[in-house]
Each structure stands twice: as C-alpha cells, then as structure tokens.
Amino acid sequence: MRSLVLSFITLWALTFAMPAEEYSPLQTEQTFVYICTGEYAKAYHAYSDCRGLGNCRASIKKITKA
C-alpha cells in the first residue's frame, strides 16, 4: 500500500514539473508546433527543443498546427 501511495505522489509531482509545451495535444485546446523558416525546411516539430530544429539556420516560429 505504501509503495502505491509513493507511486501516485511521484506521478502527481512529475505531472506538474513538465513544461506546458510538453503536454500531449489532447490536454490543450490548440496544438502548437515549431517550424524553421529556412528555405529547405519541410516539416514541423512538436517540441521547441527538437533535435531537428538544431539544424535550422533561419528563425524558428511557434504556430498552431491548424
């Protein structure tokens, strides 16, 4: 029983420790994505710290997925 309570508390604490942009799309009304405005960019990224955005030589914009 004690381990179950500790697991619940840990899960609860981790939920509030996550930055808002890392919540799943089901938890937000609008889903934001990140795009590179470079000439050869062809994909959007779900997270601002995505490894693919590290290659962006132009600016990075946050927009709604719609």
Image (cartoon, helix red, strand yellow):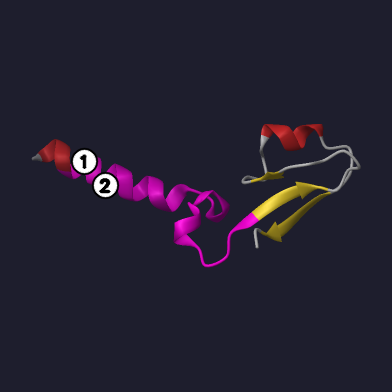
Q: Residues within 10 Å of mark 2 (few under 14, many from 20)?
A: few
What kind of residue is marked 2? Ile
> Quadrant location of residue 47?
top right
Above or below, 46 against 57 in this view is below
Residue 9 inside the magenta-drawn segment: yes
> Quadrant location of residue 7?
top left
Q: Residue at x 54, y 51 (%)?
A: 19
Residue holding disc 2: 9
What kind of residue is marked 1? Leu
Residue holding disc 1: 6
- 58 left or right of 49? right
Identify the magenta region. Answer: 5-32
**Residue 1 x %, y %:** 8, 40
The residues tagged by marks 1 and 2 sit, at their Cα atoms, a distance apart of: 5 Å
Q: Which residue is drawn at 75% across and 38% down?
A: 53
> Quadrant location of residue 42?
top right
- 51 left or right of 24? right
**Residue 46 x %, y %:** 62, 46
Residue 13 inside the magenta-drawn segment: yes
Q: Is the magenta stretch mostly helix, strand or loop?
A: helix
Q: Residue furthest bottom?
A: 29
- 22 left or right of 6? right
**Residue 23 x %, y %:** 49, 52
Instruction: Pick the residue in front: 21 or 34.
Output: 34
- Looking at the image, do the residues carrying marks 1 and 2 touch, with CB atoms under 8 Å apart? yes
Number of on-image labels: 2
Above or below, 60 against 29 in this view is above
Above or below, 28 against 60 in this view is below
